[in-house]
Image (spheres, grey):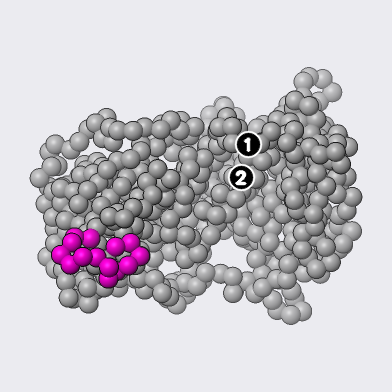
Amino acid sequence: MTSMEPHDFEEEEEEEDDDEILRQEKESLNPTEVRMSQIVMPCHCNHRQELSVGQLLKWMDSTACLSAERHAGSPCVTASMDDIHFEHTISVGQVVNIQAKVNRAFNTSMEVGIQVSCEDLFYDRHWRICHAFATFVTQRTNTGQKVTLRPIVPQTHKEKVEYSIAAERRRVRMVHDDIIKDLLSSGSIQQADSLSGYNAVPAEKTKVESVELVLPPHANHQVNTFGGQIMAWMVNVATIAASRLCQAHPTLRTIDMFTFRGPSMVGDRLLLRAIVNNAFKSSLEVGVRAEAYQEEGPNRHINSAFMTFEVLDKSGKPCNLPRIRPEPVEGERRFQEAIARKKIRLDRKYIISCKQSEAPLSVPWDPRNQVYLSYNNVSALKMLAAKKSWRLSTEKDQVCLYTLEQKSMLSIRVEKVVDVPAPTAFALLAELSNRTHWDIHYKECELIQRVDDDDFIYRVVTPSVYQGKVGSPTSSPQGEEILQDFILLASVRKPCSPGDPYVIALRSVSLPTHPPFDKCNRGEVLCAGFTILETENNKSLISYYNQASPEVLPYISNDVAGLSSSFYHTFCACSKYLIQNKLHPPAEADQHQTLETPSPTKTLHSTQL
């Protein structure tokens, strides 16, 4: 955890759009919610009188486990934990407040969201420490059968958003290891020899090995070792390894996503090994491996984790660190994998972690960041759709135009119930090149690249609202038609469970093979797309969303002001197209038949969520 100056927790929270939403969420009681408050005592702290991360992880795991068991009605164990980034430190005498609740339950696993904040009792201040997502699974019954979980029914606006995006997070977890393998196989990671200098510290000097005996206080009520306790021991040996490299007291910044591979129980001996995998300019990565064994029998691999440390100076800024010289073969492999993981962390921070208002309009497309771009694309549309402050602007022949104003951002939603089954509407709209048949704004639509079964890149050409060439709205010869083009990532999703909508999410990406050229203005889309929800009588509620960028704002503003009915006529044409083709929808096997790029994560899309 860093020693940054804390800000008020309330200031860091994203502002809700409506005071009524806040009131309802405060009054709503989630049946799976569990809260824990602990005052930090000296026995919980390190030598700097700051709460040790290991102790915090134990409290987080306990709270999350109680929440999972409250929903499941049966014993649960920790299966995995997503990335954790620790924003601030917690000192002796301050209070740790932990809140955990189940975001979504799948068949036999569930995602639990964990919020950790700190409270200063003397100054009445609160600030965020970290936010994590843990996956829990139910233990098998005495007959060896799995326990099937009942679905979560979200009540509040925030719960509905988390419920919807939980499926996307699950997709990312399932391909986490494949992403690293792809980065290594692509040859883009530099070799270890290029970074091992004469003054580099040998990695073997940082090796740590420690054994812990699992006693009853370390286990839960099911006699299994707490996942948080195992993590606390792993943090301990990782801190020692980091200290041996930097010869200072390191600060733990992040713990990468990790998975528990098997259970541990009272009586086990836990063998913990740690070593510095790589040292960058101001941070280092430590790899830790935990194995369990009894007096007889082989060692069982319980968990592996990767932790990033920094050394802070007196002003709280990271210091430069010594370089590391990896061991031959295995050490070089760990060295290169650490570079791949750092690249993944940067992708997540750049693409996923930033707020929508801070995100760049067009992100460079790279097959290695495909998973995160796809996640951001779908989750951004789901979050936009879940907003509660939509205002009805116009209604004509059951076509409704809604607007949403947030600070300097204007968004629109156009929707109508169409007499077409939802799967058929999805099949017709998911093929973006069909849009030229009903949308007069789509002059051309070319499928550039089929990334996999769920992600596609298109080039779309539309009329421009600006009468000029690129960068010069006034320099076009009179009478010449000005066009603009978009490079769009289309991410399509089928429902994970009954009640979920079909999703077709669109956002701009940039491709080196398709740079802007003189005959077209290059437009960009921040967030757009369709949601298709099945309604009664086998009909569909089709909603189109667009978060206005400068290129589409003139169209939107005219419709909102009543000066145009462009969206009404376009949506009517869409509805007519769907009805005319509902008896002959395109077969999935015939869709998107063009350039296909092999993807390391292709196995993800054949897995049922």
Instruction: Note whether 391 is above or below 130 in the view shown.
Output: below
Between the C-alphas of marks 2 and 1, the distance is: 10 Å
- Residue 31 visible in rendering: yes
Whole-percent x, y for residue 50 in the image: 82, 62
Whole-percent x, y for residue 38 in the image: 74, 63
Amino acid, disc 2 = Lys
Whole-percent x, y for residue 352 in the image: 52, 53
- Residue 528 visible in rendering: no
The answer to whether residue 140 is magenta is no
Q: Relative to the observer, which residue lies in front, 488 or 68?
A: 488
Amino acid, disc 1 = Ile
Whole-percent x, y for residue 65 in the image: 63, 48
The answer to whether residue 471 is magenta is yes
Q: What is the quadrant of the C terminus in the image?
A: top left
- For disc 1, the marked residue is 189
Q: Relative to the observer, which residue lies in front, 415 or 58?
A: 415
Q: Relative to the observer, which residue lies in front, 172 or 25?
A: 172
Instruction: Note whether 117 is above or below 437 in the view shown.
Output: below
Label 2 secondary element: helix
Q: What is the quadrant of the N terminus in the image?
A: bottom right
The residue drawn where x is 66% and y is 41% is: 339
Q: Residue furthest bottom?
A: 123
Label 1 secondary element: loop
The residue drawn where x is 81% and y is 39% is: 197
Q: State if disc 1 and disc 2 touch (CB < 8 Å).
A: yes
Q: Check residue 21 in the rendering and tell me which mark sits there, or answer none.
A: none
Q: Which residues are magenta?
A: 469-482
Instruction: Report whether 345 appears left or right of 584.
Output: right
Please identify the quarter of the rendering in which residue 273 is found.
Answer: top right
- For disc 2, the marked residue is 343
